[in-house]
Image (cartoon, coloured by chain):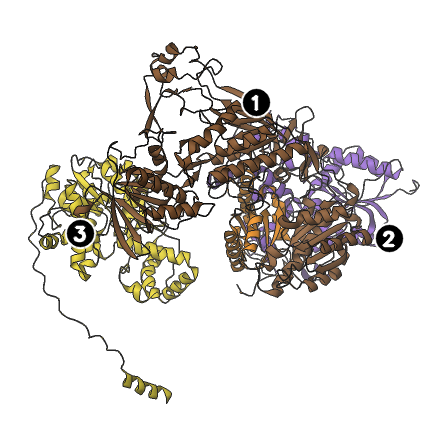
Chain colours: A purple, B brown, C yellow, D orange
Amino acid sequence: MTTTAKPKFAMYWAASCGGCEIAVLNTNEKILDVDANFDVVFWPVAMDAKYKDVEAMEDGSILLTLFNGGIRNDENEHMAKLMRRKSKILVAFGSCATEGCIPGLANLSDSREMVHTAFTTITTDNPHEIYPMTSYDVPEGEIHIPNILPMLKTLAQVVDVDYYMPGCPPESAQIAAVIDLVIQVVQGKAELPPKGSVIGAGNSTVCDECKRTRNVKTIKAFNRIWGIAPEPSLCLLEQGIPCNGPATRSGCKARCPKAGAQCIGCYGPADGVEDYGARLISAFASVLDAKEPEEIDRILDGLVDPTGQFYRFNLAGSLLKAAVPAWKKEKA
Amino acid sequence: MTANLIENTSPADGRERIGVYVCHCGTNIAGVVDVVQVADWAAKQLKHRGVVIAREYKFMCSSLGQELIEKDIKELGLNRVIVAACSPHLHEKTFRTACANAGLNPFLCEMVSIREQVSWVHTDKAAATAKAKAMISGGVERVRHQVPLEPMTVPIDPTTLVVGGGIAGIQSALEIADAGFHVYLVEREPSIGGHMAQFDKTFPTLDCSACILTPKMFSVGSHPNITLLTWSEVEKVEGYVGNFTVTIRKKARKIDEELCTGCGICQEKCPKKVIDNVYEAGLGYRKAVYTPFPQAIPNRPVVDVDNCTYYEKGTCKACEIFCPTKAIVFDQQDKILNVKVGNIILATGYELFDARRMPNYGYGRLPNVFTSLEIERLTNAAGPTNGNIVLRDGKTTPKAVGIIHCVGSRDKNFNNYCSVICCMQSLKFAHIIHERTGATIYNFYIDIRAAFKDYDEFYQRVLEEGTLFVRGKVAEVSDVPRTESEKGKLIIQVEDTLVGKQRRIPVDMVVLSAGLEPRKDTREVAKTFGISCSVNGWFIEKHPKLDPIATMTEGIFIAGCAQGPKDIPASVAQGAAAAARVLSRIEQKQMALEPVRASVIEEKCSGCRICNGLCPFNAITFHEDRMVTEINPALCQGCGTCVAACPAGAITGTGFSNDQIMAQIEGLLMLNVDQEPVAA
Amino acid sequence: MSDYILYPGCSMETGARAYYDSLKAISKPIGLNLKEIDDWNCCGATEYFGISKTPAYALIARNLALASEQSNGTRSVVAPCSACYLNLAKADYYMREQPKFGRSINEALAAGKLSYTPGSLEIHHLLDVIIYDIGLDVVEKNVVRPLKGLRVVPYLGCMVPRPDYDHRWSDHEFPVELDMLLKTLGAEVVDYPLKTECCGGHMTQISPPTAFEMIRRLIALADEREADVMTTVCPMCQLNIDGYQGEMNHFFGTNYHMPILFFTQLMGLAFGIEPKELGFGLELVSARNVLDAIGVQAPPETPPAPPKRPRKQEGLPMPSPLIKPQVEALKKVVTK
Amino acid sequence: MTNSFEPTIIGFTCNWCSYRAADLAGTARIKYPPNVRLIRLMCSGRLDPTFVFKALANGADGVMITGCHPGECHYIEQNYKALRRFQLMRRTLQGFGIEPARIRLVWASAAEGARFASEVSSFIEEVRALGPLHWGKNDNVSSALTEAPIKKEEVPA
């Protein structure tokens, strides 16, 4: 790779909150290295650029694209395909792109219901129940807005992805490290990890970085974090607080448990895990301190909304991907 | 040591060369499943998934069938084999051996059960054929992800533990000891001998039970290779086949066994009489310090702490005062022994069905209703009545006696099974009671089961003695007379199914031939030794026909009534057989273990300790220093619970890995939506 | 307060009014809340079974259907009459165990816009409810006038403990529930081996001598064991032993006087409720001795029942079977 | 539901009890519908919820989990873990709008061939009544905005 012409860098946000961009900015000076080593060609949040400019670029001309956000509408899908075509290295950046994240939770309901909730419930002041239309005629001509897909998909479910970078958002330090790595590669000082691997994260789980003391586990009852005053140095799960740490990929330095809050699993599953939620279901259930069905139920009643507990970030990326309403959509 | 994974055979590299073999099993399979179609479907449709050859053959398990596989492995360089035939529980070994002969790691051979799970249970040929395809597709996917495994071998400790000092346990212990290996014989009661020691005569030969048993008991007591631990119980069993560590509680006898000479003076002098519910079946008395019976082995008494005056009031001490050797030790404590053994034989015996559970037969309510064990004591010359057969009043001799068979057995309200011994035992009672009292004997039976050597002859003999047989299940035993002649009698209400009418038969004494039941604590015992119980509560043997001696747990064998009701000859035979199995193990010195077990990938393990409490075999240990968990391959039994539980996916299970099962699921469902399989 | 759906059955307002009255009287103190099924019909304690199964069971199932319709939440149906209990339980059991049969019954019910899911209701006998749901402790709390020195025979008859589809009773031949209850009431329980023997049942209609012998046997034993009174859980038993005791005495030339009361009446007494409310005096074999034994003022004697009118022959004569010529004639008609 | 629908059931069996029960059903020639396809595990404790989700996601209409009776587990007590996972799984699946009845837990000892067969049959009937699940087969793009939005209460269960 020649260092004369700087390699091209792009970042795009699909269905996401923008937190990932903030995280990138949180790398502070590091961001200058990006500018120093790359020619930033497309980054809607940071600079003005038009889709057609990207379309005009020749395929594979962008070295690195950080793609965050899930695929919720056909615009997202179009851009995903476009960025894939134009970039050498496409990174699913952040939880949304890798596993669906919070927007993915909408997969628990029919997309039409989601639209209803968004436009005519308490969330919106919309007395005349006006809904957006995909196409609309204005004096200047017909304008289009993207259509919503029946369910949110992860980037990998739409296009081929080179690397995954989990986290909601990814830790800035980790981002910095990845940027360094890519620069090293560009300068020929380092090798890229094998395609499809997870970057900017550990390959064990949060417990690995959690300093709380742990014993042989048994769960007698589940508690909500505000329900009890957790003993500060003891494993939260052992105190009945449903902490997703044991199943969640390390890399965040166990921020939440350190702060006394249970891990909610934003770094997603560890290597080789097919279904994040299933791992937790299995783990939690295995250590319940009960043998009688009724007794088991009594304990499980303390675990409100198990689906949300286990799939908060991973729903779209899970084996089942979405709930029946979303699937059933076309059946009726 | 552990089952090792060979990395380069990961399925991704597409280098699998799979052979699929579909068995006709005569018409057993071919009669329902279109095996020919299945075979060439596999050849065509599964090619892209690595199938290079698919054959069907009349009997795959035949030597020709096996050669077929071996030939293909050599000539076509197969590295995976699928045999679609019967249940793996029948022929997995056969085909794996065949593969091994051809130089293929046996664990790269998988069986698909299209007989037990398809042809024998389905009738719709098309559907059955489709299912067979699906299952083969699943099998192929699974075997692609299978990796070569190497079994691990463990040494066998030559010492053996025998639990239970009844006739079966005695036999096992003697066989092994005579072969020159050491045996620990643990018995819960103060003496060995078991139920047989309580009996008077044994059917059908009517030779005296004690006379044939006591010599054996004696040789156990005096055998240099047998450590006899009576008044003791096994508390904990750790380890695995060849290397068990057993914790035994030796209950305090309150007697110094070294000093005691068994002179019996303490028993003589002890002022406290206690009803003997064990040996005398509640009919007789013993002292608070006692040996259950004169010929007890070891001939050392036990102080019954619950009834001894000293422990109640702190006074008396008669035994201590009179003991010539000062062997009484009131403050003696239980001893805990840890012994290392290689194999274990369980001969824990049975319990008598509690006849109180059938109130309509009146046991416990009507005084002159007796159980079989009580009669054994009544007829026994060494028993409470010196062998006089009398009613509860202790003097009246019965003129008419009714013996009811199958009490609690062959009865869906209690036990469905036949207790095997009751018929013969009842005939024995019929003979003895008639002989001693001249009473008229009625036998109330469902069927007479006298099916062993010389048994039926005995039945004939008893018939000729004029014993009356009424075929029918007794409805009730009542003391409510309807006629003058019934006054003061026990009336047996029964439908005589041969005559086809209801009868009321007045008798003086009723004998309930109560059935055999598993001991109350069988399930706990099973738990301690890591074996399982049948629905009826007997220990489950490895195979009902071909291996009634071993259990599912390596190194643990069962003998006698613990495995199911049986008579003395059968118990002796099984005891000896168990001993033989143990001896062959000892001679082998070491044995190979199934390589199906779990292991932890250290770098993935975050030490969350979820799995730590899950292993009942204590195979999981946690290293505080490195904060990682480790699994002891020898202790691991391969259940895979920890594999499924690990939240980080850091535990893998050989033989049943996630990859394999996930692949099998895919395979099974490929034919689900459209019949054509999609590319993997 | 535990709620139950009550299926009273035909006898409660007629033959066994004492049972119904006493039940009403005791249910409040022990917190038994009974809601009668609206528009219930015969429990099917008829020989109908012998003639045609489906209608016979549909008849019973209609009650269950109504019950589950009106249940609003409660799953337990309680039947004080043992025949009702048995039949309801039987219908539920067979519908449950033989799904095909269950469906056909439901088809029949569908005609009346009704349906019943087998197993959705629990059918209990009153005694079972009192012992196992309410609990003897509650009963004990209510005992203000223990039945001291009263020797009582616990008699259940055949239908309650057998065949016991749902395994509710301690034993089928010698259930101890009633004994336990009586002990709790402070009575002296007589050991009574015949507690589940037949009371004669319909035999009184078919072969009186047979029935009399059965009744005699029961009373004789009770008398022999110096019982003051028998108590029962079954209107049929009460009717037979009470109603036919006179005829039985006449038949055998004996002179037994063995009052038989419903267990609820004894409970009422022990609870200190007035005999009148408990239907005392309705029995034919006077139970004054019982009241005297525990020192309670007996209600005034009820005037003897008016003599029964002889039964009229009613209905049409049985159709005579077709005879050959008629058959031939029919054949012709058919073949035409 | 149309009776023509043939559900596909994936069954997980424990090597020691239920798989042998299936064998016994075979040797005893007890018939049951061919809709079930069995997978052998060493123990019901090996059952990973992932397997169940995988099966459903790949088109199974129901999943049957079988193991030794409580207290009779060949591995002492691992079937209790299976029981607990099963109960939590059902709760979680409800969140996915999947009827809990689509997964069934059955205890069957090696001796209960007949019971195994009848459980299979009844489960198949139950799933048949629920109708196809066909997870992942309705994933075609359509417009959420051009169709009338629906309120929660209208959402098909």
- A11 left or right of C164 in image: right
- Residue that numbered label 3 is attached to: C215
Dot 3 and dot 1 within a common chain: no
**Residue labelled with disc 1:** B224
Q: Nearer the viewer, residue B607 or B16?
A: B16
SS class, disc 1? loop
Image quadrant where residue C326 sits: bottom left
Label 2 and label 1: CA atoms lie apart by 93 Å
- How far across and down, in percent of the image, does residue A265 sit? 64, 38
Disc 2 crowd rating (10 Å Cα; few below 14, some 14-19, many 20+) is few
Whole-number angstrom distance, CA of label 3 to CA of label 1: 72 Å
Residue B150, relative to residue C124: is it above or below?
Answer: above
Q: Are marks 3 and 1 in contact (CB under 8 Å)?
A: no
| Residue A100 spot, x, y in % from top left | 67, 46
Please name the residue shown 35% across and 17% down the image: B268
Tag nearer the camera, 2 or 1: 1
| SS assignment at label 3 | helix
Real-space Cα separation, disc 2 to disc 3, in angstroms? 108 Å
Instruction: Left or right? Give the position of A98 relative to C108.
Output: right
Q: Is residue A240 left or right of residue C165?
A: right
Going by the numbered disc 2, the residue's amino acid type is Glu
Q: Chain of mark 3?
A: C
**Residue, disc 2:** A58
Depth check, mark 3 against mark 1: the one in front is 1
The kind of residue on which mark 3 rests is Ile
> Circles 2 and 3: CB distance less than 8 Å?
no
x and y, in percent, of residue B583 in the image: 62, 33
Are the residues flagged by discs 2 and 3 from a single subunit? no
Name the residue: 37% across, 88% down: C335
Write the residue at 82% across / 48% down: A87
* Vertical comparison of A164 with B273: above or below: below
